[in-house]
Every structure is written in C-alpha cells, then in structure tokens.
Image: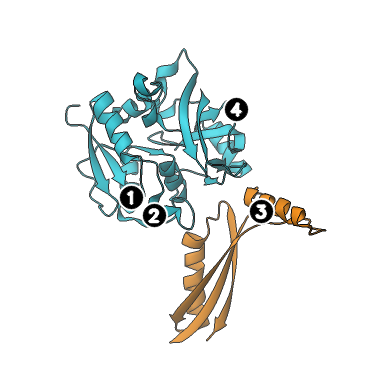
Amino acid sequence: MDQFAVKVFVRLRPSVLDPAGEATKSASIKLGAEGIKSLRIGKMIEVKIEGNGENEVREKIDLLCDRLFANTVIEDYEYSLEKL
Amino acid sequence: MDNFTVGVVVFPGSNCDRDVSWALEGCLDIRTKYLWHESSDLSDVDAIVLPGGFSYGDYLRCGAIARFSSLINALDEFVKSGKRVLGICNGFQILTESGFLPGALVANKNLNFICDDVELDIVSSKGGWFNNVDEKQTIKLPIAHGEGRYHCDSDTLKKLVDNELIALRYKNNPNGSSFDIAGITNEKGNVLGLMPHPERACDETIGRTDGLFTLKSLILK
C-alpha cells in the first residue's frame, strides 16, 4: 500500500457571489493594501490516504470531492497529490 | 386520518424539531413521532418534516453531512412513493444538498444572520402546500438564517419557472436569493423546501397563523 498526502482546494464558482470574500477585500483595503482586484475565500482540505497506487487513490479522492467535499452546484474543486 | 403520523427528523444539532412537533400536535391535532437520524425505518410515518437547526454543526456546508445519514438514504424511496416531505430552513438546505430539490443555499449576501418577519408572495401552490391563500396572495412568516441565499444556474431557474416549481418569493429579498426565491417544490409537488419557518406562525399568541395551512397540508394525499 502506498500512502499519499492530498490537498483539496474547494472554491465557490466564479458565478457565485462571495460576500465573505468581499468583506475581507474591504478590510484589506482599510488595512492599506493597495491594488487588490479580487479576493475570494475557499477551503483547503488535507487528506492522508492509502491505496494501491496513484490511480486508485485518485478515484477515491474524485468521489470524495464530487460527493462530499464540494457541492458542484456552487463550488469547483481541484487537488494536488504527493506520494509519501 | 386519525392515525396519520408525521415523522419529525432529529439530527444532532436540529433545534426546531420540538417547535414543529408542538405546532402539529398542539395547534393542528396531528400526531407526530420523532425520527432519530440513524433510523432508516420510515414505515410507520405518513409524512416527514426535516426541521430547522444546524445539523452536524453545519460543518463543511449546511446540510452536507446530514445527507449521508441513514434517514436521508431511506428518504428516496419515501419520496418516490409520493409521500410528502417538508424541509424547513436547515431542512431545505438538506433537501438541496441531497438532490431532492435543485440549487443550493449559500451565505446571505449581507453576511448577517437574519432573524425577521418577511412578506412572501405565493407563486405556485403545486402540491397544495399554499392553497389557503386564493384571495390573499401574500403571507408573512418568520425567517432565521445565515445561509439562506438560494442559488441556481440559469437553466435550473428556467426549469423552476417553466414548471411552476417556485412556491414562495420574498417581497423584499432579505438575503440576495436568485429571483427572490424563498421556497421551491419538486416536480411532483410532494417535496417542499423553504427558508421561512411556518411552525413559528401557528398561533395568534405568538404573532400570526400564516404557517398553519402549510403544516396542515402534510396530511394531503
């Protein structure tokens, strides 16, 4: 069995308004940071997972992302995978 | 109808289950039974309410974890059999997360948790959930939510409009919902999800009774 460290990024789709991102953008500007054109907040999920090779692990992660980690009505996801 | 029983689902974090049960039993004389989220036997209930609250602490997304409970797994067959399911607030979020209703509910546009009475237009009475208001096309119900902004893509919205699946629209959109949507039904009409709380408007002593009819509609065939 191989072990992998997976980082999943879940983001609101571009068409979905992100009020938390807007509020944070506004605070960033108040802090004095200049030049911020856009600020959107997502989630990062770290998973350590075992499996027989990368393909099998990718299948499991795809299922998790599609069915649980993200709601694809409003969110997109991507992930990176590192063999430990 | 004497034995008609409404199952009120209790998830860890549900907090309107007792209100729903009180409104059904105390105001409408309809028998209720609490259904723990781990149960999958729905054979002795005739309709189901998914009440408001914060199931599983709203972790990940509202309703996302509840979707994988034994009870929600068993709900598919229940819905297909034509029996009625009412999802209120967190219950509506669970119904969208689990695919019984289209779209999703996301953070309110102004990021506030909004606790208020809102005026609602009855758009469709599909399923008979709002048949009481033939003459009065507006009702007033309480809302209490942080994540009640209904969102769907334009194709879904068109389908909702074309098939008369939009049950309720806010008169003054409080949360940024697409098309002012406050509640929708499935195509068959036996599943209704809405953000407002009908169970909190069932007795004159607590303000108003505009929610009574929707709860009473649970006993419709």
Q: Secondary structure at mark 4?
A: loop
Marks 1/2: CA distance?
A: 7 Å
Within 10 Å of disc 2 (Cα), the crowding (few <14, some 14-19, many 20+) is: some
Q: Nearer the viewer, residue B141 or B50?
A: B141
User: In the figure, B139 relative to B162: above or below?
Assistant: above
Marks 2/4: CA distance?
A: 31 Å
Q: Which residue is mark 4?
A: B172
Q: CB under 8 Å between callouts 1 and 2? A: yes
Task: Look at 63% across and 58% down and name the residue there.
Answer: A41
Q: Chain of mark 3?
A: A
Check disc 3 and give the amino acid type. Gly
Tell which circle, 4 or 1, labels the residue nearer the N-terminal end. 1
Marks 2/3: CA distance?
A: 25 Å
Marks 3/1: CA distance?
A: 30 Å
- The colour one sees for chain B in the rendered image is cyan
Q: Nearer the viewer, residue B190 or B30?
A: B30
Tell which circle, 1 or 2, labels the residue nearer the N-terminal end. 1
Within 10 Å of disc 3 (Cα), the crowding (few <14, some 14-19, many 20+) is: some
Residue B20 in percent (x, y) is at 32, 35
Residue B162 in percent (x, y) is at 56, 32
Q: Are marks 3 and 4 on the same chain?
A: no
Within 10 Å of disc 4 (Cα), the crowding (few <14, some 14-19, many 20+) is: few
Q: Which residue is mark 3?
A: A21
Q: CB under 8 Å between callouts 2 and 3? A: no
Marks 3/4: CA distance?
A: 24 Å
Q: Nearer the viewer, residue B119 or A3?
A: B119
Q: Nearer the viewer, residue B207 or B172?
A: B207
Q: CB under 8 Å between callouts 3 and 1? A: no
**What quarter of the picture does the N terminus of chain A occupy?**
bottom left
Check disc 2 and give the amino acid type. Tyr
Q: Which residue is mark 2?
A: B56
Q: Residue furthest left?
A: B3
